[in-house]
Amino acid sequence: MDYHPGLVLRVNELYHDLEQREYERSHQELFRLEAPRWQKIAQEYLAPCPGPLMVLDLGTGTGLVPLQIAGFLKEPDQIVCADLSEKMLEVCRENIGKKNFRCRFQFLKLDGKRINLGSGLFDFITLNSVLHHIPEFHPFFLEINRLLKPDGLLVIGHEPNRFFFADKFLWSLYQFLSIIYRPRQFAGTVLRRLRLFEQARKIYQRFNPEMKSHSEIIGRLNQLLGQEGLIQTPLSSSQISAIVDIHSPTAGGYHRDRGIDFSEILSKYLDNFQLVSFETYAHLSEISEQNRLTKRLDSFLKKRFPQRGSTLFAVLKKNG
């Protein structure tokens, strides 16, 4: 189902406002796996620069990226933490305030349209787990192009790679292993196919505090959307998931036509950029780090299918 871009932006804003205190707990794997990757990026690309540097972290959330890279920056350098969600920015500010970084920080509330910052202002723009939330790529990348200096770097991390989810072998292997290692998640997939997921969720939440908390967020979100006249009937949990993660192949069900095709991104929106580095990883998705066996299998699959990991990470340089 296609959703109006305005609805996608507003649902994302409200959902993350409501989820802000739960976000880090519910995304522990994201923080654990991506933190070292961003530290490596900072060490390789930011630390050697003489500065002063200007860094823009779009979709900063609770601060994963700035918390990893700020230690490599110096006193004249500045990071602008920008997000659609005011509540997420509040948590980000709190998390950064607990540290003793030398660089300066600015916190910017976005409206999902034009970013009210000067053209050619930034040496680096970073995005972590952001693209799959964006309803329209064309205006989004126009703004990135406007804001980034010539020869500046754009770093895009933790995005769902369309080629993994479209690969029948890798997807089937992942589904099979999910039965063993993620039985609850696999059961959810089966229930969605049988159109019984929402009924089962209502029963299960009575015994699961986390699911109950999520249901309360869904209920409050529907209430706010109704008050604003954006919906006529309440949205289900699956529908909201599909809207929030509009380009995710697994949000609210399985969508083979979703995911990020990075070659398409380059050719359509970033044809004035050069690809500096590109990596795909997690060839068994979240099961990749389950145990020694899955780690070995993941390593084998990475060598066999280097461009088909479930997650992608890229560094691009804007032409001077």
Image (tube, helix red, strand yellow):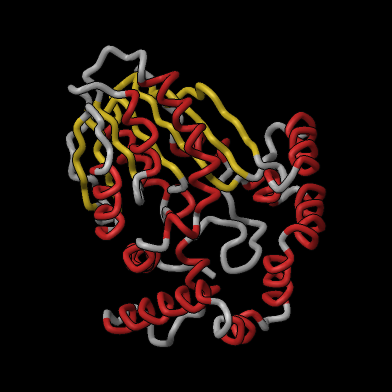
Between 141 and 176, the one lying in front of the other is 176
Vertical side of 300 occupied by 173: above or below: below
Vertical side of 19 occupied by 211: above or below: below
Between 31 and 187, the one lying in front of the other is 31
Q: Percent position (x, y) of residue 112?
A: 30, 54
Between 272 and 171, the one lying in front of the other is 171
Q: Residue at x 35, y 50 (%)?
A: 62
* Image quadrant occupied by the C terminus: top left
Q: Percent position (x, y) of residue 73?
A: 29, 24
* Image quadrant occupied by the N terminus: bottom right
Q: Quadrant of residue 305?
A: top right
Q: Quadrant of residue 49?
A: top left
Total count of labels: 0
Relative to 238, 135 lies left or right: left
Relative to 204, 294 lies left or right: right
Q: Percent position (x, y) of residue 230?
A: 33, 78
Q: Percent position (x, y) of residue 223?
A: 34, 83
Between 86 and 6, the one lying in front of the other is 86
Q: Residue at x 67, y 83 (%)?
A: 196
Vertical side of 268 occupied by 229: above or below: below
Relative to 76, 148 lies left or right: right
Q: Residue at x 75, y 48 (%)?
A: 167
Q: Residue at x 67, y 75 (%)?
A: 192
